[in-house]
Image (spheres, rainbow, N blue to C red):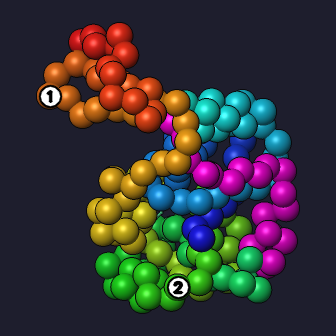
């Protein structure tokens, strides 16, 4: 299994960014999302709403101690910390893919403490320029799955999109009759 640990979330400031990190984790093939150290009902609501409509078996937890969580994780898996100071993703991704045990991906918000650089088995950079935890997570998962994650099926949920060259085609799951959702 692959979990994402979101470290350093600031409820007022990071609501949108953390929600987007969660959406990317779910859509791009992670199995769990851990909001470290804080409780934020807004993030939980966004999670519940998305899973209800679009499905997926994403595990969600919040308010857990990030340091302890990472230490515990090492009993059964390994840790990837995404940081611009790390090693190039292309130089380590094959080795990471080959490990086969549970992977915890740590992403930060503002400054990430030394602890994560040390507890991580891999400090991985998606380019050595500062950008965004959402972009870093998306590209890391895409390289990990080699593009297959875009076609993963998400169990459950109510709706499914039928790709369309123009407009929006959405059908209820397990049905082939288009909803009245054809708009531009
Ligand atoms: N300046 C902060 C620091 O030095 O720890 C990082 C702030 S950055 C906006 C937030 C998060 O985005 C980082 O903790 C990291 O997880 C991710 N990130 C940003 N650029 C990255 C890069 N080039 N490669 C990998 N992760 C990156």
Task: Give the class, few, some or many, for how many residues have Cα within 10 Å of label 2's Cα (few <14, many ≥20).
Answer: few
Question: Residue 111 appears at what percent x and percent y?
Answer: 64, 58
Q: Is residue 106 left or right of residue 161?
A: right
- For mark 1, what is the residue? 165
Q: Position of residue 81 (x, y in %)?
A: 57, 72
- At mark 2, the secondary structure is loop
Where 105 sits versus 56, above or below? below
Separation (CA) of disc 1 from disc 2? 38 Å
Residue at (42, 51) in percent of width and height: 153
Foreground residue among 132 and 54: 54
Most foreground residue, 35 or 129: 35
- Judge whether residue 93 can be spotted in this image: yes
Identify the residue at horizontal 30%, vertical 69% (top origin): 146
- Residue 100 disc label: 2
Is the CB of the residue bearing disc 2 within 8 angstroms of ligand 1?
no
- Marked residue nearer the N-terminal end (1 or 2): 2
> Magenta span covers which residues?
54-72
Queried whether the magenta region covers residue 116, the answer comes back as: no
């Amino acid at each position: 299994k692959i979990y994402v640990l979101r470290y350093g979330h600031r409820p007022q400031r990071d609501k949108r960014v953390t929600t987007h990190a969660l959406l990317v984790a779910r859509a791009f093939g992670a199995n769990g999302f851990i909001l470290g150290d804080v409780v934020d009902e807004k993030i939980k609501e966004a999670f519940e709403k998305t899973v209800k409509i679009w499905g997926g078996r994403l595990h969600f937890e919040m308010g857990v101690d990030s340091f302890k969580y990472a230490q515990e994780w090492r009993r059964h898996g390994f840790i990837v910390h995404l940081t611009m100071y790390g090693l190039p993703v292309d130089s380590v991704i094959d080795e990471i893919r080959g490990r086969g045990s549970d992977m915890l991906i740590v992403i930060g918000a503002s400054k990430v403490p030394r602890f994560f650089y040390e507890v991580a088995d891999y400090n991985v950079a998606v380019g050595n320029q500062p950008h965004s935890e959402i972009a870093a997570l998306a590209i890391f998962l895409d390289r990990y799955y080699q593009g297959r994650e875009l076609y993963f099926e998400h169990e459950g949920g109510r709706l499914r999109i039928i790709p369309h060259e123009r407009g929006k085609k959405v059908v209820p799951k397990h049905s082939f009759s288009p909803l009245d959702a054809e708009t531009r």
